[in-house]
Image (spheres, rainbow, N blue to C red):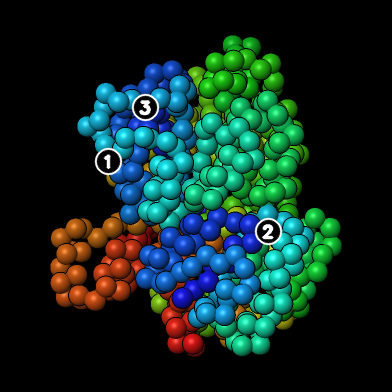
Amino acid sequence: MIALIDSGLGNLSSIRNALTQCGSDVRIVSSASELKRANGVILPGVGSFGDAMDKLRQANWIEALDDEVRGNEMPFLGICLGMQVLASHGLEGGDSCGLGWIDGTVERIEPATPTTRLPHMGWNDVSFEREESGMSAGLNGDSVFYFMHSFSIRTSSQEVVKGVTDYSGPVTACLEMEHIWATQFHPEKSQRAGLRVLKNFVRMAEERR
Amino acid sequence: MSLKSRLIPVLLLKNGLLVRSQQFVTHQIIGNPYNEVARFSEWCVDELIYLDITRSGDADLRRDDLKSGDRPDFLSILETVATTCFMPLTVGGGIRSIQDMRDRFYRGADKVTLNTLALKQPEVITRAANMFGSQAIVLSVDVRSHPTGEYEVMGGNGTIRTGRQVEDWVREMESRGVGEVLLQSVDRDGMAGGYDCELIRRVSNAVNIPVICCSGVGRFEDYAAGIEAGASAVAAANIWHFKELSDRQGKRALAAAGVDVRRFYVPPRPSVLRGRRRQRPSSSRSLDNRTGLNSTALQEKGALA
């Protein structure tokens, strides 16, 4: 079973529908105690960084995720804001602390020219490291994904950056640290390529647990 | 390696049935609310905008042959639509509160588009953008052009003059946190004479958020002018109903004009699908085939240029 965290952020039904399409048993969970039975966990999110961290803290998700994902190596997928909160801190809506699983800051994308539009909205190419493994296995070059965001993670830990896209300079598109995966793009909205990423995650969760 | 210009179909729903529209006044019934979404999803179109333009709230019971269900309430239609829609879905029409937005996000909308609410209670837009993020809030603007060359924002489905200049209005809404503009022209709607490029240019220059232009496409060749005028995405409604293979042809026309678009996808023919299912009976394999994920023909089929 894949647990989909409902912290009051984000459009859960698209992710649930996409995972069901991938043949996964997915359950929406709204309390941290329900995490124990899962093979893997997905953290979606829209809204702003500070709000998201508040919501996670209030529902005791921070400790539960730390225990299960970092302690017990439960496979994890963060999507959009669910990726950004992995950073040590974020500058959206004031400076707030993140989960701190990776060393980095969430900053507003710097427009390269006065005509650069934000949010970064739409389909963009992602170039992957080690393309034939992990979340990008089996994409066969089909690597255009849907983005909708204005802030992005800047990290000095380049070894965890799995993919990069280009919008007004390089933008972190996804992260991979063994069983901890995260995407700035929306796999649940990226049709065949996105479903492939989700499928890879489901398979990784099955193999590891 | 860069952000693609998007090509977006707009579906209009009135009293539970899909319609085509002309100048916001005439509406002709096209069909039930689900079939088109399933077809667009199969084609892997870039994105979908789904607008409920029902005015009276009552169902059209004369056309029960179109099978939209007994009670075509928009939220339940949305819930069903979302199960077959693996592309970004923007939903609009009849949104009067934060709760209405939450209801739509909960049922599978990725973005909501707001028009009347923005005109009546602009402060709600600020709250919505803070709560759901700018990327989820789209401002829909209906514009009428005047012989003097002025562009006026219209309310009430294009019927009520607001006295607002379009550039002032989109700038104000950008500062309130709107993440995108859906620009519609009341005069061009359904007339198939091409976009109002002057309008698109003015609005695109006025703001730094993406602009989706709509209204007036009659030929696939009309799309490129919208991008040249500054739009990040080109949208249309009627042409998707009345021309064959409208995604593929639209993308081809854009690419021919030098616009960077995402490649289109040609779904496998039903006979091919059936043949593959027989060879690979396991359920996960057939899932693969339905989504096209495992299709070896993917690369060449999707190739555009």
- Specify the quadrant that holds the N terminus of chain B: bottom right
Residues at discs 1 and 2 both on one chain: no
What residue is disc 1 on?
B244
Rendered residue at 70%/29% (across/down): B121
Residue B25 place in picture, x, y as percent: 43, 18
Does any portion of residue B245 appear in the rendered image?
A: yes
> Closest to the observer: B140 or B13?
B13
Output the chain of dot 2.
A
- Specify the quadrant that holds the C terminus of chain B: bottom left
Q: Amino acid at mark 3?
A: Ala
Answer with left or right where residue B30 lies relative to residue A202: left
Residues at discs 3 and 1 both on one chain: yes
Residues at discs 2 and 3 both on one chain: no
Q: Amino acid at mark 1?
A: Glu
Q: Which mark is residue A85?
A: none
Answer with left or right where residue A177 lies relative to residue B301: right
**Alpha-carbon distance for marks 1 and 2?**
37 Å
Is disc 2 in contact with disc 3, using a CB cutoff of under 8 Å? no
Q: Quadrant of residue B11?
A: top left
Mark 1 surroundings within 10 Å by alpha-carbon count, few (fewer than 14), some (14 through 19), many (20 or more):
few
Output the chain of dot 3.
B
Task: Point out the frontmost of discs 3 and 1.
Answer: 3
Q: Amino acid at mark 2?
A: Ser
Q: Secondary structure at mark 1?
A: loop
Residue A8 place in picture, x, y as percent: 63, 57
What residue is disc 3 on?
B59
